[in-house]
Image: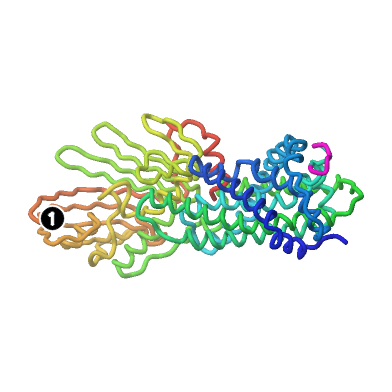
Amino acid sequence: MAPTLRDALHVVLNRPRVFALAAAALLCEAAVRLALAVVHPVLTVAFPPVVALPVLAAAAPTVRDALETPAAPPQWRVTATLRDRGPRLLAVAVGGHLVALALGAAAFLLVDTPLRAAVYATGGSLSPTTVLVAPLAGVAAGTLLAWAVLAPAVERVVAGDRLRASAAAPLRAVENRRRTATALALHAACVLAAGVLVGALASGQYATRDAATLAFLATVGAGAGTLVLLGVFVYPMHVALAASEPGEPRSVPVRRVALAALLVAGLVAGASAVRVTETRPGTATAVSPLPADASDAYAAALDNTGAADHRVVATERWDGDRAVATTVVERSARQFRASLRHENRTDVGYADSGVAYKFRGYTSGFFRLGAVPADGDTAHALPGYWQVSDDYTVTEGVGVGYGLPAARTGSWTTVERAGGTRTLELTGDAAVFEALQGSATGSVSAETARIRMRVDAERGVVLGGRARLNATVDGTQLVRNVSYAVETGRGVDARRPAALGSRSLGELAWDVFAY
Protein backbone atom coordinates (compact mmCIF):
# COMPACT_ATOMS: atom_id res chain seq x y z
CA MET A 1 0.00 0.00 0.00
CA ALA A 2 1.29 3.46 -0.87
CA PRO A 3 2.51 5.50 2.12
CA THR A 4 0.37 8.38 3.33
CA LEU A 5 1.23 11.79 4.75
CA ARG A 6 0.46 10.38 8.19
CA ASP A 7 3.15 7.74 7.63
CA ALA A 8 5.58 10.53 6.70
CA LEU A 9 4.79 12.40 9.89
CA HIS A 10 5.29 9.19 11.90
CA VAL A 11 8.72 8.65 10.30
CA VAL A 12 10.04 12.12 11.00
CA LEU A 13 8.85 12.00 14.61
CA ASN A 14 10.09 8.48 15.35
CA ARG A 15 13.27 8.25 13.28
CA PRO A 16 15.78 10.65 14.89
CA ARG A 17 18.30 10.22 12.06
CA VAL A 18 15.73 11.30 9.48
CA PHE A 19 14.86 14.35 11.55
CA ALA A 20 18.51 15.19 12.19
CA LEU A 21 19.57 14.77 8.57
CA ALA A 22 16.73 16.92 7.23
CA ALA A 23 17.29 19.56 9.89
CA ALA A 24 21.07 19.66 9.30
CA ALA A 25 20.71 19.96 5.52
CA LEU A 26 18.10 22.72 5.77
CA LEU A 27 20.02 24.58 8.48
CA CYS A 28 23.15 24.57 6.31
CA GLU A 29 21.10 25.88 3.39
CA ALA A 30 19.62 28.61 5.60
CA ALA A 31 23.07 29.55 6.93
CA VAL A 32 24.39 29.96 3.39
CA ARG A 33 21.45 32.20 2.48
CA LEU A 34 21.78 34.32 5.60
CA ALA A 35 25.46 34.83 4.81
CA LEU A 36 24.51 35.85 1.26
CA ALA A 37 21.92 38.29 2.66
CA VAL A 38 24.77 40.31 4.16
CA VAL A 39 26.23 40.67 0.66
CA HIS A 40 22.89 41.46 -0.99
CA PRO A 41 19.34 40.41 -0.04
CA VAL A 42 18.52 39.34 -3.61
CA LEU A 43 21.11 36.56 -3.31
CA THR A 44 19.06 34.90 -0.55
CA VAL A 45 16.43 34.12 -3.16
CA ALA A 46 18.51 33.89 -6.34
CA PHE A 47 21.08 31.40 -5.05
CA PRO A 48 20.16 27.80 -6.04
CA PRO A 49 19.63 25.15 -3.31
CA VAL A 50 22.93 23.38 -3.95
CA VAL A 51 23.35 22.41 -0.29
CA ALA A 52 20.04 20.96 0.86
CA LEU A 53 18.66 19.57 -2.39
CA PRO A 54 21.44 17.04 -3.18
CA VAL A 55 21.61 15.79 0.41
CA LEU A 56 17.85 15.43 0.87
CA ALA A 57 17.50 13.84 -2.56
CA ALA A 58 20.26 11.32 -1.81
CA ALA A 59 18.55 10.37 1.45
CA ALA A 60 15.14 9.99 -0.18
CA PRO A 61 15.49 6.24 -1.01
CA THR A 62 16.23 5.47 2.65
CA VAL A 63 13.29 7.58 3.81
CA ARG A 64 11.07 5.82 1.28
CA ASP A 65 12.13 2.45 2.63
CA ALA A 66 11.24 3.63 6.13
CA LEU A 67 7.82 4.68 4.88
CA GLU A 68 7.09 1.43 3.08
CA THR A 69 8.59 -0.96 5.65
CA PRO A 70 8.58 0.77 9.04
CA ALA A 71 9.80 -2.32 10.90
CA ALA A 72 12.95 -2.83 8.81
CA PRO A 73 16.20 -1.14 9.89
CA PRO A 74 17.11 1.70 7.49
CA GLN A 75 19.94 1.23 5.03
CA TRP A 76 21.62 4.62 4.59
CA ARG A 77 23.10 5.10 1.11
CA VAL A 78 23.51 8.89 1.07
CA THR A 79 27.23 8.91 0.31
CA ALA A 80 26.97 6.37 -2.50
CA THR A 81 23.99 8.15 -4.04
CA LEU A 82 25.79 11.51 -3.92
CA ARG A 83 28.84 9.97 -5.55
CA ASP A 84 26.77 8.51 -8.36
CA ARG A 85 24.04 11.16 -8.81
CA GLY A 86 25.70 14.27 -7.34
CA PRO A 87 26.57 16.11 -10.60
CA ARG A 88 23.08 15.59 -11.99
CA LEU A 89 21.48 16.68 -8.71
CA LEU A 90 23.55 19.87 -8.76
CA ALA A 91 22.46 20.47 -12.36
CA VAL A 92 18.82 20.02 -11.38
CA ALA A 93 19.30 22.33 -8.39
CA VAL A 94 20.67 25.10 -10.61
CA GLY A 95 18.41 24.61 -13.63
CA GLY A 96 15.33 23.95 -11.55
CA HIS A 97 15.95 27.06 -9.49
CA LEU A 98 16.17 29.20 -12.61
CA VAL A 99 12.78 27.87 -13.67
CA ALA A 100 11.42 28.33 -10.14
CA LEU A 101 12.63 31.94 -10.05
CA ALA A 102 10.96 32.67 -13.37
CA LEU A 103 7.70 31.10 -12.18
CA GLY A 104 7.97 32.87 -8.82
CA ALA A 105 8.52 36.26 -10.46
CA ALA A 106 5.59 35.62 -12.81
CA ALA A 107 3.35 34.64 -9.89
CA PHE A 108 4.36 37.77 -7.98
CA LEU A 109 3.57 40.07 -10.90
CA LEU A 110 0.23 38.40 -11.61
CA VAL A 111 -0.90 38.51 -7.97
CA ASP A 112 0.67 41.78 -6.84
CA THR A 113 -0.46 43.97 -9.77
CA PRO A 114 -4.23 43.64 -9.24
CA LEU A 115 -3.81 43.84 -5.46
CA ARG A 116 -1.94 47.13 -5.69
CA ALA A 117 -4.35 48.45 -8.29
CA ALA A 118 -7.16 47.76 -5.81
CA VAL A 119 -5.25 49.64 -3.10
CA TYR A 120 -4.76 52.65 -5.36
CA ALA A 121 -8.38 52.54 -6.56
CA THR A 122 -9.55 52.95 -2.96
CA GLY A 123 -7.22 55.89 -2.36
CA GLY A 124 -4.61 53.90 -0.44
CA SER A 125 -0.84 54.07 -0.69
CA LEU A 126 2.21 51.94 0.11
CA SER A 127 5.12 52.71 2.40
CA PRO A 128 8.68 52.84 1.03
CA THR A 129 9.53 49.74 3.08
CA THR A 130 6.71 47.78 1.48
CA VAL A 131 7.83 48.85 -1.99
CA LEU A 132 11.40 47.73 -1.23
CA VAL A 133 10.70 44.43 0.50
CA ALA A 134 7.50 43.13 -1.11
CA PRO A 135 9.06 42.12 -4.48
CA LEU A 136 11.81 40.08 -2.81
CA ALA A 137 9.40 38.42 -0.39
CA GLY A 138 6.84 37.82 -3.12
CA VAL A 139 9.30 36.26 -5.55
CA ALA A 140 10.73 34.12 -2.73
CA ALA A 141 7.25 32.84 -1.88
CA GLY A 142 6.49 32.15 -5.53
CA THR A 143 9.81 30.36 -5.99
CA LEU A 144 9.15 28.09 -3.02
CA LEU A 145 5.71 27.28 -4.41
CA ALA A 146 7.21 26.55 -7.82
CA TRP A 147 9.57 23.95 -6.30
CA ALA A 148 6.49 22.02 -5.18
CA VAL A 149 5.73 21.44 -8.87
CA LEU A 150 9.37 20.88 -9.88
CA ALA A 151 10.13 18.23 -7.23
CA PRO A 152 9.43 15.26 -9.58
CA ALA A 153 12.53 16.21 -11.60
CA VAL A 154 14.65 15.59 -8.51
CA GLU A 155 12.93 12.27 -7.88
CA ARG A 156 13.66 11.04 -11.39
CA VAL A 157 17.35 11.93 -11.12
CA VAL A 158 17.57 9.90 -7.90
CA ALA A 159 15.83 7.05 -9.69
CA GLY A 160 18.58 7.07 -12.32
CA ASP A 161 16.94 8.91 -15.22
CA ARG A 162 18.97 11.20 -17.45
CA LEU A 163 18.60 14.95 -17.17
CA ARG A 164 16.42 15.31 -20.26
CA ALA A 165 13.91 12.75 -19.05
CA SER A 166 14.02 14.19 -15.54
CA ALA A 167 13.29 17.69 -16.86
CA ALA A 168 10.05 16.43 -18.39
CA ALA A 169 8.93 14.75 -15.14
CA PRO A 170 7.20 17.84 -13.65
CA LEU A 171 5.13 18.21 -16.82
CA ARG A 172 4.01 14.60 -16.57
CA ALA A 173 3.33 14.89 -12.84
CA VAL A 174 0.98 17.84 -13.36
CA GLU A 175 -1.54 15.35 -14.72
CA ASN A 176 -1.73 13.89 -11.19
CA ARG A 177 -3.82 16.75 -9.85
CA ARG A 178 -4.18 15.32 -6.36
CA ARG A 179 -0.43 15.07 -5.85
CA THR A 180 0.21 18.52 -7.35
CA ALA A 181 -2.47 20.13 -5.19
CA THR A 182 -1.16 18.43 -2.05
CA ALA A 183 2.43 19.52 -2.71
CA LEU A 184 1.34 23.10 -3.42
CA ALA A 185 -0.76 23.11 -0.23
CA LEU A 186 2.22 21.96 1.85
CA HIS A 187 4.48 24.64 0.41
CA ALA A 188 1.76 27.28 0.71
CA ALA A 189 1.34 26.44 4.39
CA CYS A 190 5.08 26.95 4.92
CA VAL A 191 4.99 30.27 3.07
CA LEU A 192 1.96 31.45 5.02
CA ALA A 193 3.43 30.53 8.41
CA ALA A 194 6.76 32.23 7.64
CA GLY A 195 4.98 35.25 6.16
CA VAL A 196 2.81 35.76 9.24
CA LEU A 197 5.84 35.57 11.53
CA VAL A 198 7.95 37.91 9.38
CA GLY A 199 5.06 40.36 9.04
CA ALA A 200 4.61 40.46 12.81
CA LEU A 201 8.32 41.05 13.42
CA ALA A 202 8.74 43.64 10.65
CA SER A 203 6.05 46.02 11.89
CA GLY A 204 8.33 48.11 14.14
CA GLN A 205 10.05 51.46 13.54
CA TYR A 206 13.81 51.90 13.94
CA ALA A 207 15.79 55.01 14.82
CA THR A 208 18.86 54.37 12.67
CA ARG A 209 19.70 52.59 9.43
CA ASP A 210 22.02 50.19 11.27
CA ALA A 211 19.23 49.22 13.63
CA ALA A 212 16.88 48.69 10.69
CA THR A 213 19.49 46.53 8.93
CA LEU A 214 20.00 44.37 12.03
CA ALA A 215 16.26 44.05 12.47
CA PHE A 216 15.92 43.03 8.83
CA LEU A 217 18.56 40.31 9.21
CA ALA A 218 16.95 39.10 12.44
CA THR A 219 13.55 38.97 10.74
CA VAL A 220 14.99 37.05 7.80
CA GLY A 221 16.65 34.67 10.28
CA ALA A 222 13.36 34.08 12.08
CA GLY A 223 11.60 33.41 8.78
CA ALA A 224 14.38 31.05 7.71
CA GLY A 225 14.19 29.21 11.03
CA THR A 226 10.45 28.74 10.60
CA LEU A 227 10.94 27.38 7.08
CA VAL A 228 13.66 25.01 8.32
CA LEU A 229 11.42 23.61 11.04
CA LEU A 230 8.47 23.18 8.71
CA GLY A 231 10.72 21.81 5.97
CA VAL A 232 11.83 18.98 8.24
CA PHE A 233 8.22 17.75 8.28
CA VAL A 234 7.43 18.53 4.64
CA TYR A 235 10.46 16.61 3.34
CA PRO A 236 9.25 13.06 4.15
CA MET A 237 5.80 14.07 2.93
CA HIS A 238 7.34 14.83 -0.47
CA VAL A 239 8.94 11.39 -0.42
CA ALA A 240 5.56 9.85 0.42
CA LEU A 241 3.93 11.71 -2.48
CA ALA A 242 6.64 10.41 -4.83
CA ALA A 243 6.11 6.85 -3.58
CA SER A 244 2.38 7.14 -4.27
CA GLU A 245 3.00 8.11 -7.91
CA PRO A 246 1.97 5.35 -10.39
CA GLY A 247 4.90 3.48 -11.88
CA GLU A 248 3.86 3.75 -15.53
CA PRO A 249 5.20 6.87 -17.25
CA ARG A 250 2.73 9.53 -18.28
CA SER A 251 2.86 11.33 -21.59
CA VAL A 252 3.70 15.03 -21.60
CA PRO A 253 0.56 17.08 -22.39
CA VAL A 254 2.35 19.19 -24.99
CA ARG A 255 -0.65 21.18 -26.15
CA ARG A 256 -1.78 22.02 -22.63
CA VAL A 257 1.71 23.02 -21.58
CA ALA A 258 2.19 25.21 -24.65
CA LEU A 259 -1.20 26.88 -24.20
CA ALA A 260 -0.55 27.48 -20.51
CA ALA A 261 2.90 28.90 -21.26
CA LEU A 262 1.49 31.29 -23.86
CA LEU A 263 -1.29 32.38 -21.54
CA VAL A 264 1.03 33.01 -18.61
CA ALA A 265 3.57 34.82 -20.81
CA GLY A 266 0.85 37.09 -22.16
CA LEU A 267 -0.48 37.87 -18.69
CA VAL A 268 3.00 38.57 -17.34
CA ALA A 269 3.77 40.84 -20.30
CA GLY A 270 0.53 42.72 -19.70
CA ALA A 271 1.17 43.09 -15.96
CA SER A 272 4.73 44.27 -16.63
CA ALA A 273 3.49 46.84 -19.14
CA VAL A 274 0.96 48.15 -16.62
CA ARG A 275 3.68 48.53 -13.99
CA VAL A 276 6.35 50.07 -16.23
CA THR A 277 3.95 52.64 -17.70
CA GLU A 278 2.56 53.44 -14.21
CA THR A 279 -0.97 52.74 -15.39
CA ARG A 280 -3.14 52.66 -12.30
CA PRO A 281 -6.49 53.91 -11.00
CA GLY A 282 -6.77 56.95 -8.80
CA THR A 283 -4.22 59.16 -10.60
CA ALA A 284 -6.75 61.74 -11.78
CA THR A 285 -7.19 64.75 -9.51
CA ALA A 286 -10.75 65.82 -8.97
CA VAL A 287 -11.64 69.47 -9.51
CA SER A 288 -13.08 70.93 -6.32
CA PRO A 289 -14.25 74.54 -5.89
CA LEU A 290 -12.78 76.24 -2.84
CA PRO A 291 -14.69 77.01 0.35
CA ALA A 292 -15.86 80.57 0.95
CA ASP A 293 -13.74 81.02 4.08
CA ALA A 294 -10.27 82.27 3.08
CA SER A 295 -8.32 80.16 5.60
CA ASP A 296 -10.19 77.01 4.58
CA ALA A 297 -9.79 77.93 0.92
CA TYR A 298 -6.01 78.25 1.15
CA ALA A 299 -5.67 75.00 3.11
CA ALA A 300 -7.82 73.15 0.54
CA ALA A 301 -5.84 74.68 -2.34
CA LEU A 302 -2.58 73.46 -0.77
CA ASP A 303 -3.97 69.93 -0.40
CA ASN A 304 -5.25 69.87 -3.99
CA THR A 305 -1.95 71.19 -5.33
CA GLY A 306 0.10 68.64 -3.42
CA ALA A 307 -2.11 65.78 -4.59
CA ALA A 308 -1.81 66.73 -8.27
CA ASP A 309 1.14 66.79 -10.64
CA HIS A 310 2.73 70.13 -9.77
CA ARG A 311 5.70 72.41 -10.28
CA VAL A 312 6.59 74.97 -7.62
CA VAL A 313 9.21 77.63 -8.39
CA ALA A 314 10.25 79.68 -5.36
CA THR A 315 12.54 82.65 -6.01
CA GLU A 316 14.13 84.44 -3.07
CA ARG A 317 15.95 87.75 -3.47
CA TRP A 318 18.26 89.52 -1.03
CA ASP A 319 21.02 92.11 -1.33
CA GLY A 320 21.22 91.89 -5.12
CA ASP A 321 21.44 88.09 -5.03
CA ARG A 322 18.81 85.42 -5.57
CA ALA A 323 18.16 81.69 -5.22
CA VAL A 324 15.67 79.75 -7.32
CA ALA A 325 14.30 76.49 -5.94
CA THR A 326 12.19 74.34 -8.26
CA THR A 327 10.26 71.28 -7.16
CA VAL A 328 8.51 69.15 -9.79
CA VAL A 329 6.36 66.24 -8.68
CA GLU A 330 4.78 64.22 -11.47
CA ARG A 331 2.71 61.83 -9.42
CA SER A 332 1.01 60.24 -12.43
CA ALA A 333 4.43 59.06 -13.70
CA ARG A 334 6.02 58.73 -10.24
CA GLN A 335 8.83 61.16 -10.96
CA PHE A 336 10.30 63.71 -8.56
CA ARG A 337 12.78 66.39 -9.57
CA ALA A 338 14.17 69.17 -7.40
CA SER A 339 16.75 71.81 -8.21
CA LEU A 340 18.37 74.77 -6.48
CA ARG A 341 20.09 77.49 -8.51
CA HIS A 342 22.33 79.95 -6.69
CA GLU A 343 25.53 81.80 -7.59
CA ASN A 344 25.67 80.37 -11.12
CA ARG A 345 25.46 76.84 -9.78
CA THR A 346 22.52 74.47 -10.15
CA ASP A 347 22.15 71.30 -8.09
CA VAL A 348 19.58 68.79 -9.32
CA GLY A 349 18.09 65.79 -7.54
CA TYR A 350 15.88 63.24 -9.21
CA ALA A 351 13.93 60.13 -8.25
CA ASP A 352 11.49 57.82 -9.97
CA SER A 353 10.39 54.20 -9.72
CA GLY A 354 13.89 52.94 -10.54
CA VAL A 355 16.49 55.51 -9.46
CA ALA A 356 17.44 57.88 -6.64
CA TYR A 357 19.95 60.61 -7.46
CA LYS A 358 21.38 63.33 -5.19
CA PHE A 359 18.75 63.01 -2.46
CA ARG A 360 20.70 62.76 0.77
CA GLY A 361 19.33 60.61 3.55
CA TYR A 362 16.93 58.70 1.33
CA THR A 363 19.04 56.10 -0.47
CA SER A 364 19.11 52.60 1.00
CA GLY A 365 22.09 50.86 -0.55
CA PHE A 366 21.03 47.57 1.03
CA PHE A 367 18.38 47.08 -1.65
CA ARG A 368 19.93 48.87 -4.57
CA LEU A 369 20.44 46.94 -7.79
CA GLY A 370 23.54 48.79 -8.88
CA ALA A 371 24.97 52.30 -8.86
CA VAL A 372 26.52 54.39 -11.61
CA PRO A 373 28.52 57.64 -11.39
CA ALA A 374 26.73 60.70 -12.74
CA ASP A 375 28.00 64.27 -12.78
CA GLY A 376 30.27 63.88 -9.76
CA ASP A 377 27.68 61.95 -7.76
CA THR A 378 26.07 58.50 -7.81
CA ALA A 379 22.75 57.34 -9.20
CA HIS A 380 21.36 54.44 -7.16
CA ALA A 381 19.10 51.84 -8.77
CA LEU A 382 16.31 52.09 -6.21
CA PRO A 383 12.60 52.99 -6.19
CA GLY A 384 13.56 56.47 -5.03
CA TYR A 385 10.22 58.13 -5.70
CA TRP A 386 8.58 56.46 -2.70
CA GLN A 387 11.51 57.23 -0.43
CA VAL A 388 11.62 60.91 -1.39
CA SER A 389 7.93 61.65 -1.64
CA ASP A 390 7.14 59.89 1.65
CA ASP A 391 8.60 62.84 3.58
CA TYR A 392 7.69 65.51 1.02
CA THR A 393 4.93 68.06 1.43
CA VAL A 394 4.16 70.99 -0.83
CA THR A 395 4.98 73.37 2.04
CA GLU A 396 8.52 71.98 2.49
CA GLY A 397 9.89 71.90 -1.05
CA VAL A 398 13.59 71.14 -1.55
CA GLY A 399 14.79 72.85 1.60
CA VAL A 400 13.83 74.92 4.63
CA GLY A 401 11.83 77.94 3.53
CA TYR A 402 11.45 76.93 -0.12
CA GLY A 403 8.02 75.33 -0.06
CA LEU A 404 4.72 77.15 -0.30
CA PRO A 405 3.64 79.04 2.81
CA ALA A 406 1.93 76.77 5.29
CA ALA A 407 -1.77 76.99 6.13
CA ARG A 408 -3.40 77.23 9.56
CA THR A 409 -0.82 79.54 11.11
CA GLY A 410 -3.21 82.50 11.21
CA SER A 411 -6.35 83.95 9.70
CA TRP A 412 -6.34 84.48 5.93
CA THR A 413 -8.58 87.01 4.19
CA THR A 414 -9.74 87.42 0.61
CA VAL A 415 -8.45 90.73 -0.75
CA GLU A 416 -9.34 90.38 -4.44
CA ARG A 417 -11.52 88.34 -6.83
CA ALA A 418 -11.00 88.53 -10.59
CA GLY A 419 -11.44 86.15 -13.52
CA GLY A 420 -11.92 83.02 -11.40
CA THR A 421 -8.87 83.83 -9.27
CA ARG A 422 -8.93 84.72 -5.60
CA THR A 423 -6.08 86.55 -3.89
CA LEU A 424 -5.70 85.51 -0.26
CA GLU A 425 -3.65 87.42 2.30
CA LEU A 426 -2.07 86.48 5.61
CA THR A 427 -0.75 89.12 8.01
CA GLY A 428 0.51 89.06 11.56
CA ASP A 429 4.13 88.83 12.67
CA ALA A 430 4.06 85.36 14.24
CA ALA A 431 1.61 83.91 11.69
CA VAL A 432 3.71 84.96 8.70
CA PHE A 433 6.93 83.77 10.34
CA GLU A 434 5.49 80.34 11.09
CA ALA A 435 3.97 80.03 7.59
CA LEU A 436 7.34 80.76 5.95
CA GLN A 437 9.73 79.07 8.36
CA GLY A 438 7.61 76.05 9.26
CA SER A 439 7.99 76.48 13.02
CA ALA A 440 6.89 78.80 15.79
CA THR A 441 9.21 80.99 17.83
CA GLY A 442 9.14 82.88 21.08
CA SER A 443 9.39 86.53 19.98
CA VAL A 444 8.76 88.05 16.56
CA SER A 445 8.69 91.80 15.90
CA ALA A 446 8.20 92.69 12.23
CA GLU A 447 8.31 95.87 10.20
CA THR A 448 6.80 94.00 7.26
CA ALA A 449 4.91 90.70 7.48
CA ARG A 450 2.59 89.81 4.63
CA ILE A 451 1.85 86.87 2.36
CA ARG A 452 -0.40 87.08 -0.68
CA MET A 453 -1.24 83.93 -2.61
CA ARG A 454 -3.39 83.54 -5.72
CA VAL A 455 -5.63 80.49 -6.00
CA ASP A 456 -7.83 79.16 -8.81
CA ALA A 457 -11.34 79.36 -7.39
CA GLU A 458 -12.75 76.70 -9.74
CA ARG A 459 -9.91 74.16 -9.96
CA GLY A 460 -9.03 74.61 -6.31
CA VAL A 461 -5.23 74.88 -6.68
CA VAL A 462 -2.55 77.43 -5.85
CA LEU A 463 -1.35 79.60 -8.75
CA GLY A 464 1.45 81.60 -7.11
CA GLY A 465 2.07 84.56 -4.88
CA ARG A 466 4.60 86.48 -2.84
CA ALA A 467 5.77 86.62 0.75
CA ARG A 468 7.63 89.41 2.51
CA LEU A 469 8.99 89.36 6.04
CA ASN A 470 11.33 91.85 7.67
CA ALA A 471 11.48 90.99 11.33
CA THR A 472 13.55 90.63 14.44
CA VAL A 473 13.26 87.08 15.73
CA ASP A 474 14.61 86.43 19.21
CA GLY A 475 17.03 89.31 18.73
CA THR A 476 18.16 88.24 15.23
CA GLN A 477 17.28 90.07 12.03
CA LEU A 478 15.41 87.98 9.43
CA VAL A 479 14.51 89.19 5.95
CA ARG A 480 12.56 87.05 3.50
CA ASN A 481 11.42 88.16 0.06
CA VAL A 482 10.06 85.16 -1.81
CA SER A 483 7.90 84.92 -4.93
CA TYR A 484 6.10 81.74 -6.01
CA ALA A 485 4.97 80.39 -9.36
CA VAL A 486 2.90 77.20 -9.37
CA GLU A 487 1.75 75.00 -12.24
CA THR A 488 -0.48 71.95 -11.93
CA GLY A 489 -1.94 69.39 -14.29
CA ARG A 490 -0.86 67.62 -17.44
CA GLY A 491 1.76 70.15 -18.50
CA VAL A 492 4.00 69.27 -15.55
CA ASP A 493 7.02 67.21 -16.60
CA ALA A 494 9.66 66.02 -14.12
CA ARG A 495 12.12 65.12 -16.82
CA ARG A 496 15.03 62.81 -16.15
CA PRO A 497 18.39 64.67 -15.93
CA ALA A 498 20.61 64.16 -18.96
CA ALA A 499 23.53 63.33 -16.63
CA LEU A 500 21.87 60.01 -15.77
CA GLY A 501 21.98 58.73 -19.33
CA SER A 502 19.91 55.69 -20.32
CA ARG A 503 18.32 53.45 -17.74
CA SER A 504 20.44 50.66 -16.28
CA LEU A 505 19.31 47.05 -15.91
CA GLY A 506 18.84 47.60 -12.19
CA GLU A 507 16.56 50.58 -12.84
CA LEU A 508 14.56 48.59 -15.38
CA ALA A 509 14.15 45.77 -12.86
CA TRP A 510 12.81 48.19 -10.25
CA ASP A 511 10.51 49.73 -12.88
CA VAL A 512 8.86 46.33 -13.21
CA PHE A 513 8.79 45.25 -9.57
CA ALA A 514 8.06 48.62 -7.89
CA TYR A 515 4.48 49.70 -8.63
Q: Is residue 118 above or below residue 75?
A: below
Pick out the residue farthest to the right. Answer: 248
In magenta stretch: residue 159: yes
Q: Please identify the dominant SS of the magenta region.
A: loop
Q: Is residue 236 above or below residue 251?
A: below
Q: Position of residue 397 (x, y in %)?
A: 32, 49
Q: Which residue is mark 1?
A: 448
Quadrant in which the N terminus appears: bottom right
| Front residue of 439 and 319 | 439
Q: Secondary structure at mark 1?
A: strand
From the viewer's perspective, tell me whether residue 448 is left or right of residue 501: left
- Could you classify mark 1 by the number of other residues whose Cα lies within 10 Å: few (under 14), some (14-19), or many (20 or more)? some
From the viewer's perspective, tell me whether residue 326 is left or right of residue 27: left
Tell me if I can see residue 258 in this picture.
no
Amino acid type at circle 1 is Thr
Q: Is residue 199 above or below residue 291?
A: above
From the viewer's perspective, tell me whether residue 59 is left or right of residue 123: right
| Front residue of 364 and 8 | 8
Q: How many marks?
A: 1
The quarter of the displayed image where residue 431 is located:
bottom left
Tell me if I can see residue 437 in this picture.
yes
Specify start and end residues of the magenta stretch as a single range. 158-163
Q: Position of residue 343 (x, y in %)?
A: 23, 33
Q: Position of residue 50 (x, y in %)?
A: 65, 40
Seen at 12% across and 54% down, the residue is: 471
From the viewer's perspective, tell me whether residue 329 is left or right of residue 29: left
In magenta stretch: residue 493: no
Q: Position of residue 366 (x, y in %)?
A: 46, 43
| Front residue of 25 and 129 | 25
